[in-house]
Amino acid sequence: MSNGICSQSLISRFEAGKEIPNILVLKKLCEKLEIKLDTLFFDNCALAVEIEELLFINYLQRNYLTIEKIIEKQYRSVNLMEREFYSGITLFHNCKNYKSSIQRLEYLLEKIEIHKLGGLDYNEIEPFVYSYIGLNYLFMGKLNIAEKYLYRGLERLNYQSLYKWEKVKSEIFFHVGLLEIEKKIWIKRNNILQIQKIFV
């Protein structure tokens, strides 16, 4: 198959996902296989949309283990932004690995900021990214940092068109509610400790 186009080892690297062919090599391979070049992109696009919908349905149903399996199986077919978001929340829900979750989600925020520099000031998952970073910090007991991120997520709700995410925006309010409950518990606990110190 590679005859006259490239080496067989390079074809193997393409198949394994270790290399991406340039457009000229891709065109020659399509001619050799007698398929149209645009067929490759259409099929991949349709698959990506299908996977995106499947991930979102599982997110709505709180099937975080299924989300993790889909990402592992279809890693390259999932949009980078969604892949990082879902990876971050599965690290939170499935593994309770708050630090790794924060790293994934902060990396995603950096990507969103880069897109903004390029003139794309829109990303519907941005409020949820802030909210989940805040939730991670909340579960780590870092209330001040959690508050900053959770309220930033709440603020970003006002600037974003959420489209499909509109269905789950109450989740951000729930996360903020958890923070406020935890702050009240922390204040009571501190007050009790202060009272105990006086009488001990």
Image (cartoon, rainbow, N blue to C red):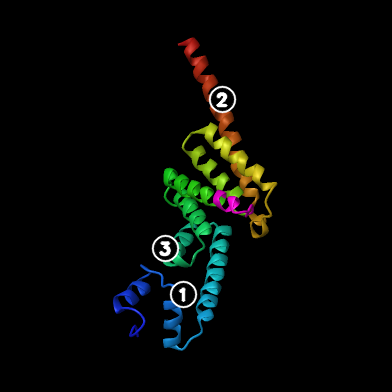
Few, some or many residues within 10 Å of mark 1 (<14, 14–19, 20+):
few
Q: Which residue carries the number 1 mark? A: 23
Residue 36 seen from this side: yes
- The image shows residue 75 at horizontal and vertical percentages of 44, 64
Q: Which residue carries the number 3 mark? A: 72
Q: Which mark is residue 109?
A: none
Q: Which residue carries the number 2 mark? A: 187
- Is residue 75 shown in magenta? no
- Whichever of callouts 2 and 1 sits on the residue coming sooner in the sequence is 1
Q: State which region is magenta.
A: 113-122
- The image shows residue 136 at horizontal and vertical percentages of 49, 42
Q: Provide the secondary structure element on which disc 1 rests.
A: helix
69 relative to 2, above or below: above
Q: Quadrant of the C terminus?
A: top left
Q: What residue is drawn where x is 48% and y is 67%?
A: 77
Amino acid at circle 1: Ile
Q: Are marks 3 and 2 in contact (CB under 8 Å)?
A: no
